[in-house]
Amino acid sequence: MTLPFSDIAPLDKSVPGVQPIEALILPRLPVLYAKRAARLRMLAEHNGAYLEFLASLVEAQKFWLEQHPITPEQAMPVTALMGAGGLAPVKPTQQLLATTPYWHAAFKHFVHTLAPLVSEPVASKLEAAVHDTPEQLATKAAALFNQDYAAVDAGVAVLLWAALSVYWAQAVALVGVQKHTAQAHNEASCPCCGAPPVGGLVLTGDREGLRYLQCSLCETRWHAVRATCVVCHATQHIDYWTFEKTDAPIQIETCGDCHSYLKIFRQDRDPQQDALADDLVSQTLDEALEAQGFARAGINPFSFPS
């Protein structure tokens, strides 16, 4: 099976004239998962077994998506949190997380599928989490939403977030962009779910040169003007860093005003890049910028901060 060039649907060529820049782009989730898994396996050839494990996790997400698509009723707890008319989305409460069994079931499926692929100590922690009560799972999930990453075992956190992500991404997609107008209320967080970005994508194809931020939870991409800090919106002291030549496919954008940084994935230079996958193999860039006092404006849910 030949996959589409991109998980982003092409523009409607039947519409005459220059089309406006889309505030939001929702991915074709089955294509996104398939391409991400393939990218992880390709990168794993030179970057170790963890990326192979993550490829299997993404394939498990795709399987769950296709075998257990959510219903509008199941999506309601998430869609009720989404901001309307430019209002910021609301963070889920611990009670909501405890009473939404869809993602609990997805997490347990991921553990049963992936525990045989990891070491015995890691597998033991994963299997112990399977026996958590809904309230205990919700406590862990709430810690991740509150960016208290140290409160959750690293291996458990990755699978928990993957389960939350496959739930949130479907719920947001059911609402659709027509019913949710994204305003630039806070470019440092997703206008659909409030999660931080993984990084920025400079797109190719129909949208060549436009920058969108990639959500770490619901997979939404939201437009962000280039050469503008996504944290403080300053434009005067923006710099770009790379270890390679100036046209490298991965760059880091830094802000000299608030000392934040964002990793930029130039799909116009390498269309096969995936923000989550390629971030993992370019973390020496992060280390170099953090050593200079810059703080990352985002997370990678495959590698939560310690």
Image (cartoon, grey):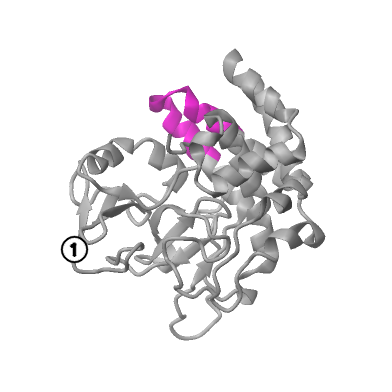
**Residue 152, picture quadrant:** top right
Q: Tell me the kind of residue under disc 1.
A: His
254 relative position to 113: left or right: left
Does 155 sit above or below residue 222? above
Q: Which residue is at 36% across, 49% downward?
A: 270
Is residue 118 in view from this perspective? no
Seen as rendered, the residue at the extreme bottom is: 17
Q: Please state the extent of the stretch shown in magenta in the rendering.
A: 37-56
Residue sitting nearer the eye, 213 or 290: 290
Is residue 53 in the magenta section?
yes
Check the image and name the residue furthest to the top. 120
Residue 155 sits inside the magenta stretch: no
Image quarter where the N terminus lies is top right
Label 1 residue SS:
loop
Q: To which residue does mark 1 refer?
A: 237
Where is residue 296 shown, x and y percent of the image?
Answer: 34, 48
Which residue lies at the image location 56% right of the left edge and 51% below the top edge? Answer: 217
The residue that appears at 47% across and 54% down in the rendered structure is 196
In the rendered image, is residue 278 in sight?
A: yes
Q: Nearer the viewer, residue 243 or 156?
A: 156
**181 lies above or below 270:** below
Residue 261 location, x and y as percent? 30, 52
Task: Determine whether 16 is above or below 62 in the image.
Answer: below
Q: Position of residue 139 (x, y in %)?
A: 65, 41
